[in-house]
Amino acid sequence: MLRYLASRLMQGAVVILLVSIGTFSMMHFIPGDPVDLMVGEAQVTQEQLDMIRRKWGLDRPVHEQYLAWASNMARGDFGQSVIRTGVPVRTMIGEAAVVTAKLNLLAFFISIAIALPMGIAAAVRRYSGFDYAIMVSSTLGLALPNFWIGLMLIVLFSLLLGWLPPFGLPSWKGYIMPVAVIVANQTALLARMMRASTIEGMGEDYVRTARAKGLVERVVVSRHVVRNALLPVVTVIGYRISFLLSGTIVIENVFALPGLGQLFIESVNRVDYQVVQAIVLLLSVLVVLGNLITDMFYGYIDPRIRIG
C-alpha cells in the first residue's frame, strides 16, 4: 500500500508540474500587457513602464519568471495581484473559495442524500412507474443546461414571485437557487449510475446465492448489492470532489456570486497572471488529491482490489 501511495503521489507531482508549466506558458501568450492595464489611461513615461516591469519581474526571461514563481508557490507564497496592487493573491482566493466551497458542499451532500436511495429504489422497482419517473427526471436533469435552469429559476422565483434574490449573497437565501441548479444536475447523474450499477449487481452469482440461502430481499440488497454497486458511483463522486471548487464557473456567473469561478474569469479578462496561475495550480492539486482519495476508497469498498 505504501509503495502504491508513493507511486500515485509521484504521478500527481508530475501532473502538477506539467500543469504549472503549461499554465504559466499560456498566460504569456494571451494578448494584452498587464502593465498597460495597471497604468490605465495615466500618462507615464517609458522609464516608469520599465520600472513597473522590473518590480514585477516581467522584464526577465520567461524561464526565470517561472522558476521564481514556482519557488514562491512551493513556499506557499502566491504573490500579489498585478491588477489589485498590494492585495495578496492568497487573500483573494481565500475569500472566493469560501463562497464556492459552501455552494458545492451543500449541493454535494444534498445530491448524495437524494440520488443514492433514489437510484437503489428505482433499481429494485425496475420498470415500475417510480422507475420511469426517475429515469425521465434524471434525463431532464442531465439534458437541460445549467445556465438555462438558473435563468428560469431567476425568472420564476425572483422576478415573478419575488421570493429569492436574483443575484449575489445578501443572505442565506442567495444560496438556494444556485444550490438547486447544481443539485439537479448531480442528482440526475448519480441516480442513473446508482440505478444501473445496482441492476447489474442484482444479477451476479453471489446475489443469487444469498437469495438461495433464504435472506430477505432487503438484506440481500443492502448487504450484498449496494456495497459493490457503489464502486462506479464512488468514481463519479471522486471526480466531483476533484472539481469541487472549479465546477461552478457558469453558475457563479449566472447568479453573480463572488466565488472562484467569477474570480477566475475576471482575472483572465484582466490578464492578472498571479491570480490565474494560482487558481489553476490549486485546482490541479485538488484533482490529484481527489483521484488519490477515490483510489483509496476502492480498497475499502471492495476488498478484491486492495493493494498489499
Image (tube, rainbow, N blue to C red):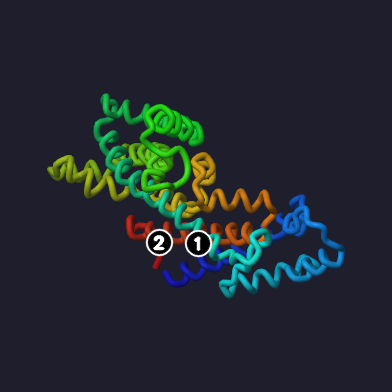
Q: List x then y, in percent, for residue 97.
A: 49, 57
Closest to the observer, 31 or 156: 156
Q: Residues within 10 Å of mark 2 (few under 14, many from 20)?
A: some
Q: Which residue is mark 2?
A: 296
Q: Quadrant of the N terminus?
A: bottom left
Q: Nearer the viewer, residue 8 or 54?
A: 54
Are discs 2 and 1 less than 8 Å apart at CB? no
Image: 167 above or below 259: above
Residue 193 shows in the view: no
- Where is residue 59, by image quadrant? bottom right
**Residue under the point 50% across and 31% down:** 148
Q: Secondary structure at mark 2?
A: helix
Tell me the quarter of the image containing the C terminus: bottom left
Query: Helix or strand or loop: what does disc 1 sit on?
Result: helix
Percent position of residue 34, x then y:
74, 57
Q: Residues within 10 Å of mark 1 (few under 14, many from 20)?
A: few
The residue labelled by disc 1 is 94
Q: Residue at x 33, y 37 (%)?
A: 195
